[in-house]
Image: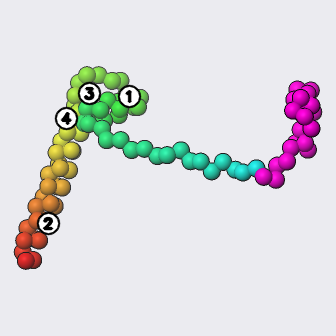
């Protein structure tokens, strides 16, 4: 069948499934890649308030920035402590 005949059948609303050879078709298996991002305490505070239904105020954002900064410092302190403990333990082994 010529392309012009196919177009005519399609344009006129005829059933074209019987015309097509679907035996070699493939399902699209492409998946959207995932992405991760790291945000500063200020960015996290802003995102949290923008996504929430609460009223956004400068004071609230400032408080959230402080809270996230405190959490980040605590996590860094714990990570540093684990690193120091690992360092101390490895010195004792040798």
Callout 3: 10 Å neighbours few (<14), some, many (20+)?
A: some
Magenta residues (range): 1-24
* Mark found first going from the N terminus, 2 or 3: 3
Image quadrant of residue 92?
Answer: bottom left
Q: Position of residue 8 (x, y in %)?
A: 91, 27
Marks 3 and 1 close (CB-CB < 8 Å): no
Using the rendered image of the protein, determine whether residue 26 is visible from the camera's viewpoint: yes
* Mark found first going from the N terminus, 4 or 1: 1
Dot 2 corresponds to which residue?
86
Image quadrant of residue 72?
Answer: top left
For label 1, the SS is helix
Mark 3 → mark 4, Cα distance in angstroms = 10 Å
Mark 4 → mark 2, Cα distance in angstroms = 30 Å
Q: Camera-side residue: 50 or 32?
A: 32
Dot 4 corresponds to which residue?
66
* Mark found first going from the N terminus, 3 or 1: 1
Residue 14 lies left or right of residue 46; in this view the side is right
The extreme front residue here reads 2
Q: Camera-side residue: 70 or 7?
A: 7
Dot 3 corresponds to which residue?
60
Mark 2 or mark 3, whichever is nearer to me: 2
Callout 2: 10 Å neighbours few (<14), some, many (20+)?
A: few
Q: Position of residue 15 (x, y in %)?
A: 91, 37
What residue is drawn where x is 76% and y is 50%?
25
Vertical order, 36 against 23 (above or below): above
Q: Camera-side residue: 77 or 22?
A: 22
Dot 1 corresponds to which residue?
50
Marks 4 and 2 close (CB-CB < 8 Å): no
Main secondary-structure element of the magenta-colored stretch: loop
Q: Position of residue 11 (x, y in %)?
A: 88, 26
Callout 1: 10 Å neighbours few (<14), some, many (20+)?
A: few
Mark 4 → mark 1, Cα distance in angstroms = 17 Å
């Amino acid at each position: 069948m010529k392309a012009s005949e196919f177009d005519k059948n399609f344009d006129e609303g005829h059933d074209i499934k019987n015309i097509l050879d679907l035996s070699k078709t493939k399902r699209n298996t492409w998946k959207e890649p995932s992405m991760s991002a790291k945000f500063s305490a200020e960015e996290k505070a802003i995102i949290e308030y923008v996504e929430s239904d609460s009223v956004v105020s400068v004071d609230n954002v400032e408080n959230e920035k402080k809270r996230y900064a405190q959490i980040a410092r605590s996590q860094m302190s714990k990570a540093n402590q684990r690193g120091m403990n690992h360092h101390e333990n490895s010195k004792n082994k040798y």
